[in-house]
Image (cartoon, grey):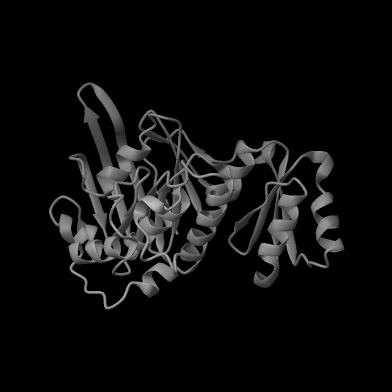
Amino acid sequence: MIRVESVAKRFGRLVAVDNVSVNIPAGDSVALWGGNGAGKTTLIRCVLGLLNFEGRIQVGGHDVRRQGKLARMQIGYVPQELGFYDDLGVSEAVVFFARLKGLTLRTTDGVLASVGLEGHGRKRIRELSGGMKQRLALAIARLGDPPVLVLDEVTASLDACGRRDFVSMLTRLSGAGRTMLFASHRIEEVASLAKRVVMLENGKVSAVLDTAEFVSRSCPGSVLHMTLRPVVRNQAVTLLRESGFTATLNGVGILVPVENEQKAVPFRLLADARITVDDFELIPAAQLGTGGTTGHAESEIHP
């Protein structure tokens, strides 16, 4: 769905993106990870066609430079910094952006309800909280049902509750088969949303890791990957978080980083709550620390 081939971007003498190649199949969810200046936002802006670059990028089979409009029609984008007109009404904003996309809406009720903003259509944007503005941005990004979502540090300005609610919405979208490319600096978001992680350093790809391996490298001790039935996963995550664990949804189960002396505690907590663990895998961080794909300036992600 997104194919990045030998992409480089320079700002004068600064090389912001250096010969990066990434292939993201349809339905995949990929996180860009790295410190400030690693090249995450620059790469995203290249994918969006907002910057000139060397190399080639395709979205849905459309070349970003030669078929920019067709490529961007495949993408719903949510930036870190929102640029809404504060005096505009919420429903008015949805209609305005729908018209920019060539869409006609009979009502905005369904669009707003899909992101938990039902009943807020008559409010001015200035009356919304930060989390509600991000929900509005997501609703607008999804207008026309684009197959790809691109997000750049979208929870950076939200409090813990706002981040949790917003990531929960994105998790449902990712689970519905939508292709997702996003930048984040929060491990819990990557663990919840990504299937793979592209680690960037000084504009280069330093590693491409499965999410479980990435979390294990980033967290001390070990990581429990616990498989549970869908109906009890959210309950299990809430219970473990209330007990002090950083539990996150991932794939068919949950990821729970644990210190070596705490490996059995999550099982006891879930058993006391009569939540059945169907299967589990204990992933030692030290063991996975030597098994990744590292040191490549050009890396490719496969399904």
| Residue 46 image offset from top left, x and y in percent | 25, 44
| Residue 107 image offset from top left, x and y in percent | 31, 76
| Residue 27 image offset from top left, x and y in percent | 42, 64
Q: Work out whether residue 199 or residue 143 is closer to the camera in this orientation and state it.
A: 143
Residue in the image at 77% along x and 39% along y: 259
**Is residue 302 in view from this perspective?**
no
Locate residue 129 relative to residue 76 in the image: left or right: right
Instruction: Indicate whether 10 appears above or below 256.
Output: above
Residue in the image at 29% along x and 52% along y: 87
Q: Quadrant of the C terminus?
A: bottom left
| Residue 158 image offset from top left, x and y in percent | 50, 45
Q: Please identify the quarter of the rendering in which residue 286 is found.
A: top right
Instruction: Indicate whether 40 appears above or below 57.
Output: above
Q: Please identify the quarter of the rendering in which residue 152 is found.
A: top left
Residue in the image at 37% along x and 60% along y: 123
Q: Work out whether residue 213 or residue 233 is closer to the camera in this orientation and state it.
A: 233
Q: Quadrant of the N terminus?
A: bottom left
Q: Which residue reaches farthest bottom?
A: 106
**Is residue 286 in view from this perspective?**
yes
Q: Which residue reaches farthest top?
A: 13
Instruction: Indicate whether 289 appears above or below 181.
Output: above
Q: Work out whether residue 228 or residue 214 is closer to the camera in this orientation and state it.
A: 228
